[in-house]
Every structure is written in structure tokens, then in C-alpha cells.
Image (spheres, helix red, strand yellow):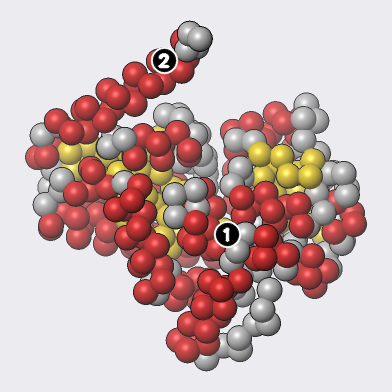
């Protein structure tokens, strides 16, 4: 059967990108950084900080080009290009990376941690280092920095949501990764994977009934124009990482490798601080735009989503995480999921 033209073109593009990555002179390295988010999002300001630090620190021997709105392809496309050796990077959540390293997906599991401080400790743990090393060696994906906290995820609808029962029959857009799909299903809704760029039109045309996102993403995508309620379920702390082609990274000098990773971590800290500072401001702006802010029964959602850890085989890694946090921070160990 003849392969469709678009598939042939896509395959050809990947081959060309991989070829260029392999034979591009190391002294004139260029990294294309892609995000699905808009320029108004705090994460974009973090990417700007990363670009400036890398270019200045390398005396412009490394050039960084930023692309917003998934201009070069969606997150999964960019990951595939990175695996093929192309000089690309993308800001991506752990759920998407779970296809290549299953355990790392637990970072996107529901109600895993309570605050940003716990997340920062977790992504600097020996466990996370093992997951990141496995991604690099087995899949060709290099973690540059995984401390980009985008905020708590909430349910966006056109009716108020107080308990999981209120989401019965609601087609809720989510990220197309196992941990996200299982979480949304456990919360009572019908998970509907859709690219972020299509969420606004999907809501407008009623392809979906709702979505789930952090405040900055909701506001940056102007979703307040097509939803009536932000239901603060806080079901996932969205932490993302800037990841790149391990092939591209390995061809840098040791000094430039250290510079790129240091810049990614510092930019992640900067972006996180912007999110933390703007949370209440953005919520007020959403309310001023006519969106009603709802405080659901969080305990009901926590109870409903306990099954996710069993479904995905995360019980053991969950216990390891809680034990590690208890040792490092003195926090109480949560009950097993």
C-alpha cells in the first residue's frame, strides 16, 4: 500500500534534520527551542532567559532560536525529532516522557505532592537522576533542567464542578499520555486528547465540553472567552522540563554542556518565580473576564484518583517518593495509594 504523501514528507524532514545535526560544525551550533505556549506565558520569559544566558555564556558559539505556538510541530513531534538527533529542544511534561521512561510519568500523577518545594527536592533526587540517565541513553532525550513549575492544574468547564459526579459525561481535553488520561477518567470525566493549539476552537465548536490547565495557560490561550468556570481541583502540579537531543548535547564541549544545563536550571527557577508571583493576579484577571472561580471538594477528587497509582503500577515508586521526601524534608508520609 502506498504511503500517504504527508507521511513521506514528514519522514523526509526528520531524516534531513538528523543529517544536519550530525554534520553541522560544532562551533556554529544552533538549538531550536519549541513550546506550545504563547509569549504571554511566564514559561516563555524563562525561555528568553535561557536563550540569553546560553548565547552570552558561549560568546554566541551556541545560538538559541525560540518558537511559540508549536510552530515546528507539537511536543510529540519535537521529541521524535530530538530522538532522531535534530538540534531541537522542547518544554515538556513528565507524562509525555513516560512513553520512553515509564517511571518518570509519576511526576504528573494526581495529588503526588503538596507544594513546589517538594517538587524541587524530588527532581534533584537520585531517583530522578536515574530516570533522566535512562532517557538519555535509551531514547536519546537529554534533560537539561526539570524544575519549570507551571502551576496547579484546574478543570475548565461551562458548568460548576464540585465533585467527580459533576464531570459525568463531560468530554474533557487532556494531554494524550497514560497518566493524564487515567487521571481525568478517575476524576469522572471522559478524557479527550487534543493538542493545546486546538483547545480554544475545540471548546468554541463544542468538540470538547471542557479542559484542564494551569492559570497561566488558561489566560495565555484566552480560554476565558469560551469557558464559564475554573474549578480549582488542583489535581496535578504541572512541572515540566526543558529537554533536548542527547546527540546534539553530546557534541558540545564539556564547558558548553555545563553552561546549557546551568542556564536551563536557572531559567526554570526564574520562570517558576514568575508563576508564583502572578497566580493571584491571573486569577483576578480571569474573574474580571467573567469566569466564576469554584472551590470543589478536593478530598472527593483525591479519593477518586487513588486508583491511578494502581492502574499504572506506580504504587512502589509512590512509596519511594514519599519516603525520600520524609527523609529530606521531614514531611509526613502519605498513605499508600
Where is 243 relative to 20, above or below?
Answer: below
Q: Secondary structure at mark 1?
A: helix
The residue that label 2 is drawn on is 8
Where is 237 relative to 202, above or below?
Answer: below
- Residue 281: in sight, yes or no? no
- At a point 62% along the width and 54% down the height, the residue shown is 179
- Residue 198: in sight, yes or no? yes
Name the disc covering residue 100, or none: none
- At a point 83% along the width and 69% down the height, the residue shown is 300
The quadrant the C terminus occupies is bottom right
Q: Nearer the viewer, residue 75 or 40?
A: 75
Q: Residue furthest front?
A: 1
Q: CA distance from mark 1 to mark 2?
A: 34 Å
- At a point 67% along the width and 49% down the height, the residue shown is 181
The residue that label 1 is drawn on is 108
How many neighbours does mark 2 have within 10 angstroms: few (below 14), some (14-19), or many (20 or more)?
Answer: few
Where is 29 relative to 268, above or below?
Answer: above
Q: Nearer the viewer, residue 335 or 268?
A: 335
- At a point 61% along the width and 42% down the height, the residue shown is 176
Q: Nearer the viewer, residue 67 or 189?
A: 189
Q: Nearer the viewer, residue 49 or 183?
A: 183
Q: In the rendering, at what x and y percent does residue 21 appear?
A: 22, 33
Amino acid at each position: 500500500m502506498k504511503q500517504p504523501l504527508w507521511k513521506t514528507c514528514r519522514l523526509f524532514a526528520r531524516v534531513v534534520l538528523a543529517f544536519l545535526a550530525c554534520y553541522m560544525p560544532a562551533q556554529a551550533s544552533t538549538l531550536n527551542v519549541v513550546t506550545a505556549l504563547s509569549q504571554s506565558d511566564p514559561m516563555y520569559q524563562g525561555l528568553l532567559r535561557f536563550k540569553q544566558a546560553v548565547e552570552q555564556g558561549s560568546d554566541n558559539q551556541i545560538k538559541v532560536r525560540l518558537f511559540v505556538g508549536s510552530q515546528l510541530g507539537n511536543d510529540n513531534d519535537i521529541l521524535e525529532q530530538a530522538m532522531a538527533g535534530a538540534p531541537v529542544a522542547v518544554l515538556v511534561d513528565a507524562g509525555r516522557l513516560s512513553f520512553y521512561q515509564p517511571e518518570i510519568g509519576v511526576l504528573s500523577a494526581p495529588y503526588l505532592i503538596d507544594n513546589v518545594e517538594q517538587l524541587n527536592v524530588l527532581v534533584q533526587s537520585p531517583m530522578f537522576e536515574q530516570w533522566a540517565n535512562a532517557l538519555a541513553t535509551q531514547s536519546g532525550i537529554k534533560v537539561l533542567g526539570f524544575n519549570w513549575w507551571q502551576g496547579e492544574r484546574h478543570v475548565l468547564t461551562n458548568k460548576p464542578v464540585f465533585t467527580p459526579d459533576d464531570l459525568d459525561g463531560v468530554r474533557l481535553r487532556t494531554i494524550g499520555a497514560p497518566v493524564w488520561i487515567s487521571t481525568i477518567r478517575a476524576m469522572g470525566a471522559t478524557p479527550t486528547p487534543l493538542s493545546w493549539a486546538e483547545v480554544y476552537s475545540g471548546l468554541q465548536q463544542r468538540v470538547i465540553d471542557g479542559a484542564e490547565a494551569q492559570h497561566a495557560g488558561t489566560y495565555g490561550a484566552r480560554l476565558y472567552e469560551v469557558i464559564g468556570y475554573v474549578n480549582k481541583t488542583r489535581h496535578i502540579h504541572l512541572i515540566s522540563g526543558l529537554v533536548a537531543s542527547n546527540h546534539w548535547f553530546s557534541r558540545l564541549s564539556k564547558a558548553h554542556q555545563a553552561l546549557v544545563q546551568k542556564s536551563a536550571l536557572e531559567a526554570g527557577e526564574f520562570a517558576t518565580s514568575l508563576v508564583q508571583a502572578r497566580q493571584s493576579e491571573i486569577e483576578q484577571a480571569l474573574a474580571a473576564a467573567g469566569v466564576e472561580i469554584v472551590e470543589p471538594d478536593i478530598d472527593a477528587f483525591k479519593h477518586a484518583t487513588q486508583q491511578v497509582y494502581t492502574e499504572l503500577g506506580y504504587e512502589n515508586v509512590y512509596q519511594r517518593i514519599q519516603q525520600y521526601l520524609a527523609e529530606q524534608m521531614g514531611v509526613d508520609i502519605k498513605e499508600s495509594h
